[in-house]
Image (tube, rainbow, N blue to C red):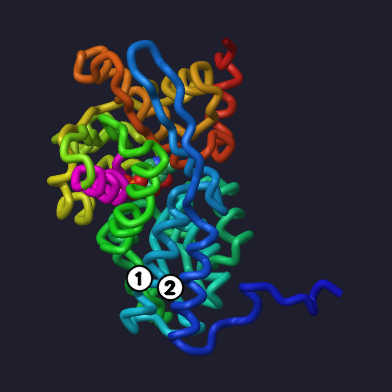
Amino acid sequence: MHKALRGPFTGAPTSRAELVERASRLLGLVGRTPVRCSRLGPVELCVKLEYSNPTGSHKDRIAVYMLRGLAEEGALEPGGCVAEISSGNTATSVAWASRLLGLRAVLYVERRVSPLKKSMIRAFGGEVVEIGDEPEERERAVEDMERRGCVYLNQSGNEYNWRAHYETSGPEILGQLHWDLDAFVMGAGTGGTITGVGERLKEALGSVLVVAVTPRASALAGGPGGDVIEGLASTRIPSLLERHRRAVDRVIEVSEAEAVEGVKALLRLTGIAAGPSTGAALVGVLRLVEEGALDRGVRAVILAADHASRYPWLLEALAGGAGP
Ligand SMILES: Cc1ncc(COP(=O)(O)O)c(C=O)c1O
């Protein structure tokens, strides 16, 4: 019986105008995530809960923005195919958004990625193509998507990624905190979030400290590529981050082990159960406090990009020491 029911995302758009209109409707489902603030010693920490987005991360925002933008430009036709090389949250978000827009999505995912992540992509309607982790594999993936006639989204260089945060996450933070904040700290992957939000906050507030957190010895920290914190760039600086780097005042290095300690601390101090990149952001804030770069009474904002439950290994680590 329920098959006869129609909803706002039933059927597939048949014209470009319809595709763009549906993408705008889909934007109504993403963002406007809650912010929770807690006093931590001398500072107030506010966490924007991006795991409240439909597939559980901030990447839902950029998936819809990239698809809508390409449809508006005429690069993407109704019923068309999109592709991304991602082993992280973006793959799931692109699969989800594509399905609701009547598009086909092919996600190139490293073979070693957890079965849970691959299942999530498939569950939301994406096709998973497994690839190795050597650089040539990316080139081969791009050739393969061209052969299939798919549009490569390339979040690491795609301006709609930056724009999604400049036009949505940034204004939301300003509104929710009544323009009253002093620092924004965020792990940098593509850099879309730190630079998009950072630039918006700077334009609105003038003075605000924008700090990118990066894995220890990463390319952004001037190193050869070091620790692994899922979602954050380690071996290279994405072109999007390079182009918008002026929005970033400082870079703080955080080790993989410190990021996990950060997750535990966030849970203990605020009750928020977030993923490792959020733990790394908290470590960044605490380091600024220790250094005296954040004084008494200031308000620092971080973004809980995703939830702890997305990482089975992290849950094991929490089980070994998350108590009060
Ligand atoms: C969990 C998580 N945190 C942080 C980031 C970094 O976000 P951005 O790519 O906007 O720099 C990502 C990106 O994939 C992520 O998946």
Q: CA distance from mark 1 to mark 2?
A: 6 Å
Where residue 53 appears, as percent x and y from the top left, is 53, 50
Give the residue drawn at x 40%, y 15%: 40
Question: Which percent across, then down, holds residue 61?
Answer: 43, 57
Magenta-colored span: 188-203
Residue sitting at 35 percent across and 70 percent down? 152
- Marks 1 and 2 in Cβ contact (< 8 Å): yes
> How many discs mark residues in the rendered view?
2
Instruction: Name the quarter where the C terminus is drawn.
Output: top right
Q: Quadrant of the N terminus?
A: bottom right
Q: In this rendering, would 55 be left or right of 94?
A: right
Q: Where's ligand 1: which quadrant? A: top left
Amino acid type indicated by mark 2: Val
Q: Is residue 162 above or below residue 191?
A: below
Estimate the x, y position of residue 283 in percent, counting from the top left: 34, 22
Q: Is residue 253 above or below residue 91?
A: above
Mark 2 residue element: strand
Q: Is mark 2 within 8 Å of ligand 1?
A: no
Q: Which mark is residue 35?
A: none
Residue 231 appears anywhere in the view = no
Q: Callout 1: 10 Å neighbours few (<14), some, many (20+)?
A: some
Q: Is residue 136 visible from the viewing direction of this image?
A: yes
Write the residue at 45% across / 27% down. Answer: 37
Circle 1 residue:
152
Task: Please state the horizontal and vertical placement of residue 124, each as a whole percent of the image.
Answer: 60, 61
> Above or below — where is 21 with respect to 202?
below
Q: Give the overall secondary structure of the magenta segment.
A: helix
Kind of residue sitting beneath label 1: Tyr
- Say which of 260 and 146 sits in front: 260
Residue at the disc numbered 2:
82
Residue farthest bottom in this picture: 15
